[in-house]
Every structure is written in C-alpha cells, then in structure tokens.
Image (cartoon, rainbow, N blue to C red):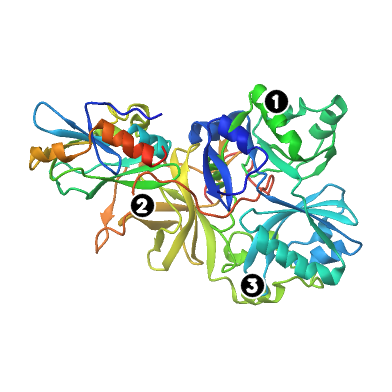
Amino acid sequence: MSNVPADLKYTRTHEWVRALPDGLVEVGITDHAQHALGDLVFVEVPEPGRQVAPGEPVAVVESVKAASDVYSPLAGEVAERNEQLATTPELINQDPFGAGWMMRIRPANAAVLSELMGAPEYEALLQAEGA
Amino acid sequence: MGRHTPLFSLHQELGARLVDFGGWDMPVQYSSQIGEHHAVRRASGVFDVSHMCVVDLRGDRVRPFLEYLIANDAGKLREPGKALYSCMLNESGGVIDDLIVYYLGEEWFRMVVNAGTRDKDLAWIREHATGFGVGVEERADLAMLAIQGPEARAKFAKLLTPAGAQAALALDTFFGRDIDGWFIARTGYTGEDGFEVMLPARDAVRVWQDLNALGVASCGLGARDTLRLEAGMNLYGNDMDETTHPLESGLAWTVAFEPASRNFIGRRALEDIKRKGSERKLVGLLLEDRGVLRSHQKVIVPGVGEGEVTSGTFSPTLERSIALARVPQATGEKVQVDVRGQLLNARVVRPPFVRFGKPCIQLHAASMRARTRKALPGGRHPPPPALPVSGRREGAAPRIAARHCPNALGRESTR
C-alpha cells in the first residue's frame, strides 16, 4: 500500500506538492509513482529561473525500464532544484516525500494550491487506478 | 487477462509486479530489478521462462528438415544433447525468430522458440515439416526455469539425486540431457553460467520454492533484459525481426554458408546481401554523457548518416547506459544519440559489455560526469507517456549460454 502523507497536495499525474513557510512550493513524485517506476537511475530537473506552466513537462525520471515526464503542478518560476539527484537518483525511491524532492517553485498565484487534490482524493484516485 | 504459466500464483504470492509479455502475464520484478540483476551476476537467481515455446520434432528425416528450416547448420549437431543457436529466416532473409535446437536423437530434436512468436513459428514449422514427414509437437506440459549465476549450478544440483547431480555438473556448455526426469541444459540468456531446466509443470512450484530456500533469488523479466543486454545478446522484436536480416543484426556468426550444398530458407537472399556487402551493422554503444539510451532513439553518425537504437538500458554492472544500435556500415567510434531532443555522445564498442560478472569494455571514467548536451533545432520531441509507466515491448527472449565471447573471462579494450 502506498504512503500518502495527509499534509501534501497531489496531481492526477502523481506529483506531490508541499507548501513551504517561505512561500515556495516543493514538488516531487509520489511513493506510488516511484514504486511503479522501479529503481531510478537518472533524473533531470529544470534549471532555476525557468518559467513553468501547469501540466508542462518540466523534469524527467528514468528507471531501468523506462523514462517518464514529471509535470509542473502549477504556474510559476523554478527557484531551486535538488542537485543531489544528479548523482543519487535513488533518493526518490528511498524517500520520495523527503530527500527525494525534485524542485521548488515560486508560484505565480499561491491560491491555486487549494485546487489541487488532497490526500483523501489522491488515495481514491489510486484505488480507482487499481493501485 | 493473458496466459499464465504454472508459476503464476506463486509469483503473485511472492509480490511480483506482473505485466503483459507476449500475451502472457509475467513477473517483471519481485522487489528491485537492480537487486535481482546483481543477484545473478554475483550469486544466483531463478527466472520463470515457461512462456517460451518448447517444440519436439520427430521423424526419420528431422535432420534434413532442420538443415533446410534454419540458417545455422543442424548438421553440426552430432553429439547427443548438443544445442545450437540459430535464426529461422523467411525467403528474403528476414528473421522469423531466433531459437535453440537440441539434438536428442537421430529422430528427435527439440526446439525452443520465443513466446511472442509462438503462433507464427508453429504455423511456419508445420507448413515446412509436412514435406519431410516430420511430426511437430508443442510441449505445453513442460514448465521452464532458468537458474543463472556463478552459484547457480551448484545450488540447483542440490535438488537432484547424487548421481543426477554428478551428471548435471558434468554437462559441458551448450549441452543438455534428461536427468532425474527433467531436461537440464547448460544454457542461458544472462552471460553467466547456469542451467535452463524443462520439467513437468506440476514440479515447477516446488522446485522454485526449494531454490528460494537455498538462497537463489526470484528474478523477473526486467533483470533478464538488463542481463542479456549487458551480455550483448539480441532480443527478438527489438534487435531483429522479419524486416532485418542476420548480417545487419550481429548474427552473421549464426549463419552457416558452408557447406555450400546446403539449401536453407533465406540462403539466396543472404548470399546476395553478402556479395554486395551489408549496408548496416549492429554495434554496441556506451553512453559517455549522463542519460539512458532506449530503443528507437535516433543515432547520428557525423559525416556518415543515421541509425537507430534497437535496445537500450541502464547497465547495473557498469552503472552507465548501454545499447545495441543498427548503424551504417561505415560508422566509426564516435556517434551521437538523440535522447528526447538532446544530442548525447556515445562510443561504439564491441559487445559483450559484461560476461561472468566482469566488464568486457573499457570505461573512460573521466568522461562520466561530462555534460555536453546540445539542444536539437526544433526543440523537444514528443514526450514519453505520463507516469506511471508499465508494460514492455512485446517479444520474448531466447537464451544463449556460451555464444563465443573471445574475451569471456577478461577485460578487453573496445577494438
């Protein structure tokens, strides 16, 4: 059974979003996503300063099996990226909601966060997908 | 729902992730694909390959039939139990399938073909067998396990009677025989030593559990794919198919043009190609930049032309990305690969990449961190599918143990 922390927001494409005290939002992929992908061997995260739109493919995660896009959950500017993933992509497998964070975005409009799924809704989505 | 092997329920109990593979629900991994890969390179692992199709061929003209049917020469099979790897070609030299054939007796040969090609293979074999009076019997009553790795043979031998164990451990590479009621062959598809065992379906679960109890790891088809690619072995449907011929698929060594008197299906077409010279060749690639090579990525050969990656992955042993690619004949040592719109540098190397647990190619460690990506004009290519990704290309795997690896036990430089 996948871990779905109650304090995060989620997308239908299996990203999680955490509101940080400084106004940035932290983004990664969920436990369900990392499990479905398998051992990650390569991660490409966007350069800070890049403008991103909701639903835009902004990062790539590659497992032994396949490459997948990671989509921006909202509009904004990439403020930081997790540089450790370049050499240790397995952090996403080991700690998807913590050390495996991918990027921090400065949202154009923080209010849209409330439009993303909460944990109960995301759990329902996983159930519907047969996870 | 796909077809199930006799081990299907056990795979579920063991927590395997099951995917469709050539119409079969097969385990792609149990816990970690990389962990399973290393288990085989360093110790031992067991794979369910019961989806593959075992066909018994019987008749007093079965040898001349095989000499006509397949591109390698069944005439080479003179010692009982000897195995031969071959392609089965169509008239234009395209590869219908790759297979292993065992010589069990002058009137009895056994063939193992891929799961995804079973129906067309059986139809083709039956069509040609009629004229030779050869009987074609699919052995759906058999399960097939591959036990692979440096410790695999010794572990498996513990399941046999003392006399059986002695006989199994005495098998030469690429030989098989009936031992204790099971057909045991010293073949495989991983680049490690080991056995492939055909046994009555009712024995399969018990054998698997006994092997697990001996410390043999359950391994899925994901690890099987990274192991075979490191070993430089082709996968049917990826690296060759009916639109490609053996001479451009790294399989020229499996085509026996001698004796010249042997007429096999596809011979005339291959002789034409050989005379003119094959325009393309299959090579190994080692990615020098960071990233992962995947099948169908475009290969750019500066000043020469273009090719395509046929199989690509991350190599758990080398911790680098490796691939097989079909490229123009004049391709030299340096190429670039279009990885989602970025041109990455790759070096042409001669497979295998890894054999018997050891790298066979030189890694230039210094270049590993270098990032010399350039954007392609026109920007990103269509993105890959959204998360989560499941499933694999259809087309199952053959099994080759000891295809000659001139550098089998040591390291080699690229050329």
Residue A33 visible at all: no
| Residue identifier under label 2 | B385
Residue type at tag 2: Pro
| Residue identifier under label 3 | B274
Residue B114 image position (x, y, % from top left): 65, 54
Q: Nearer the viewer, mark 3 or mark 1?
A: 1
Q: Is residue A126 above or below residue A54?
A: above
The kind of secondary structure element at disc 1 is helix
Residue at image point 87% right, 67% down: B133
Residue B59 image position (x, y, % from top left): 89, 61
Q: Nearer the viewer, residue B126 or A12?
A: A12
Q: Quadrant of residue B106?
A: bottom right
The kind of secondary structure element at disc 2 is loop
Q: Residues under labels 2 and 3: Cα distance?
A: 40 Å
Q: Residues under labels 2 and 1: Cα distance?
A: 40 Å
The kind of secondary structure element at disc 3 is helix
Left or right of B316 in this view: A115: left
| Residue identifier under label 1 | B210
Q: Is residue B255 above or below residue A84?
A: below
Label 3: chain letter: B
Label 1: chain letter: B
Let me know if marks 2 and 3 both belong to one chain: yes
Q: Are marks 2 and 1 in contact (CB under 8 Å)?
A: no
